[in-house]
Amino acid sequence: MAKIENGRQSVDTRSIRTISSSHIDDESSLGSDSEINGFTSDRQTDKYGFIGGAQQHTEESAQDLPPQVLRQREVKWLDMLGHWDKWMIKRFNKVRLRCQKGIPPALRGRAWLYLSGGKVKKEQNQGKFQELDSQPGDTKWVDVIEKDLHRQFPFHEMFVSRGGHGQQDLFRVLKAYTLYRPEEGYCQAQAPIAAVLLMHMPAEDAFWGLVQICEKYLPGYYSPGLEAIQLDGEILFALLRRVSPLAFRHLEKHKIDPILYMTEWFMCAFSRTLPWASVLRVWDMFLCDGVKIIFRVGLVLLKCMLGTREKLKACQGQYETMELLRAIEPRYMQEGFLVREILEVPVTPQDVEREHHTQLKRWKKNRGELNFKSPPRMHGARIVMLAEPPRRQDLQQNPTIVLEVPQPTPQLKKGKEEKKSKKKKSMKKSQPIEEIPNPYSLPTDLPPPPSEPPAPPPVITETPQTVPQTVLQTETDPLHQHLAPPTDLPPAKESPLQRSTQSLSSTEQDTYL
């Protein structure tokens, strides 16, 4: 249920498991780092940092991928992030597909920042966050923010301690936003959004990610009066008529207003509703494709909980229906099931916009003009980028993961040295070099001219794999470079082994990843 607090409607959090205030106070003296962040020896953190609660990782709620699959996906995402503008403009469908499969955990924070446009926003406003962070902030918002800090993911190791580094960064981000958009101020539902971002990126990046979500993805959601979320509730209800007529008629019969059950879903982007593995997959798709993903998740949950006559037998009234929607069955929120159902819901950005215009006309007819005119909603990362085209330097990465690749610098230096000493080499008398037979010779290869009477072919005992290494040594050995004139040997041709190696390392082949 929604309630009025500080002049605006806030989300009722009674259905979310929280730590009692006395429990938090007892642990606040332990500190904020991993060793003293409120943990005891019998507490175990999952791979997402949760020490308990309904969102803790379980084998049933998530699908773990083999490490080799994750490594290959990381290579592909690093390639995309290195050429982001080209991928977004020319191959956005491939970016969408990889977001649907799930962003690799090691690159999720960086990918979210690029998808949301926060990376470009940050580069174009250098020093802005530091300027806002240094200001004291409006007292009325600072007091409210401080009261809400301990309520955000109290079972997560980053936010479990009062005054810990997680709560400090969360305060900095939320306070900076009230200074960045003083006409909006602070809304309680912004805190979970900022907390999720802080779990994956530094405070400055999280701030610009929050700015993009509030302004581009969910504009008007956190403004006074919450008119935008009420309007989207009517859009969700209208879309439900097509997706699940049975659920639609049940909610209409009992006069259950959409804002009673979808406020926390939409305003928090399901970050406080779903298991954490499902939250991350939903956010991967949400930041890629926009708010239509949020609508699809809501439609899937309503259809699963109210879409059959057997389900409706257990909820004969408004109270029973609301209790059913507050306690969604875990099997419907499981990562694999939920993602599959989300992708099958036939709701497009055009459908959302069509219903938006319809419901906006109805709103103006029944309630008058909107008090807060929010900017237009951007449906996905590609439209966000096209609306504010980035410069090349705005997309440069600050890598935290370094891949071991062949060093090109020594080769360039050798090339320069060869050019400088080209005249000296021509003056020297060339010496015969022992030819190494190519074990993977092509039909078009010609044998080298014999300088001596032909000898019986040598018996090769090494395996084919060792021969290319010997060839490589003769090519890179400075002694052979000085002794061999560049015109004595025919140009090296690409062997089938080399071609097969290139095909394995190609990022165009997505295979099963």
Image: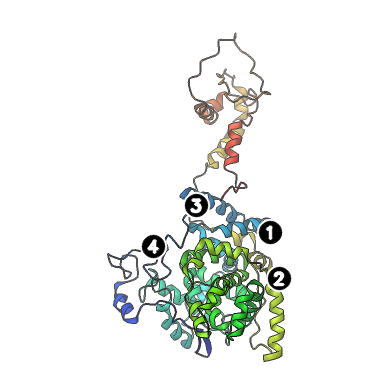
The residue under label 1 is: 89
Question: Label 2 amino acid?
Answer: Gln
SS under mark 1: helix
* SS at circle 2: helix
Outermost residue on the left side: it is 41
Contact between labelled residues 2 and 1, with CB atoms less than 8 Å apart: no
For the residue marked with disc 3, what is the amino acid?
A: Leu
Kind of residue at disc 1 = Ile
Q: Which disc, if any, is residue 70?
A: 3
N-terminal label among 1 and 2 = 1
Is label 1 or label 3 in front? 3
Q: Is residue 12 above or below residue 123?
A: below
Report x, y in % for residue 402. Answer: 49, 51
Q: Is residue 34 left or right of residue 215?
A: left
In front: label 1 or label 2: 2
| Mark toward the start of the polypeptide (1 vs 3) | 3
- Which residue is identified by label 4? 46
Label 3 and label 2: CA atoms lie apart by 34 Å
Residue 279 appears in view: no
Question: Looking at the image, which is closer to me, 344 or 162?
Answer: 344
Name the residue that disc number 2 marks.
Answer: 350
Report which quarter residue 443 is drawn in: top right
Q: Sequence-wise, which precedes: disc 4 or disc 1?
A: 4
Distance Cα–Cα, label 1 vs label 2: 20 Å
C-alpha span from label 4 to label 1: 38 Å
Along the horizontal axis of the image, is 259 left or right of 65? right
